[in-house]
């Protein structure tokens, strides 16, 4: 999955950044994004 590509960045990021990063990933992978 795409999570593997982000692992190094997540490992170096603080917890709050990890949440935002995962949120952006989930939004980017969401079909709703293409609906807009």
Image (cartoon, helix red, strand yellow):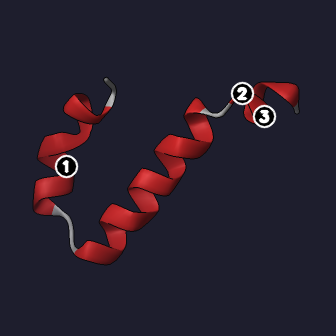
Check if mark 3's residue and mark 2's residue have beta carbons within 8 Å.
yes
Asked if residue 11 lies left or right of residue 17, the reply is: left
Locate residue 2 relative to residue 14 in the image: left or right: right
Q: Secondary structure at mark 2?
A: helix
On the image, numbered disc 2 is attached to which residue? Answer: 31
Q: Which residue is mark 1?
A: 9
Q: Quadrant of residue 2?
A: top left
Of the two numbered discs 3 and 1 on the same chain, state the one appearing first in sequence.
Answer: 1
Instruction: Mark 2: give few (<14), some (14-19) or many (20+) Cα within 10 Å.
Output: few
Q: Gap between marks 1 and 2, in whole Å? A: 24 Å
Report which residue position mark 3 lands on.
Answer: 32
- What residue lies at 20% left-to-right and 31% top-to-bottom? 4
Task: Indicate left or right for 6 with 24 as reference.
Answer: left
Residue 36 percent location from the top left of the image: 88, 33
| Extreme residue in the right direction | 36
Is residue 24 positioned above or below 30 on the image?
below
- Where is residue 27 drawn, in percent x and y? 61, 44
Residue 3, image x and y in percent?
A: 29, 35
Say which quarter of the image contains residue 7.
top left
């Amino acid at each position: 999955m795409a999570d593997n590509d982000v692992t190094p960045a997540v490992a170096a990021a603080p917890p709050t950044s990890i949440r935002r990063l995962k949120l952006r990933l989930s939004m980017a992978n969401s079909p709703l994004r293409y609906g807009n």
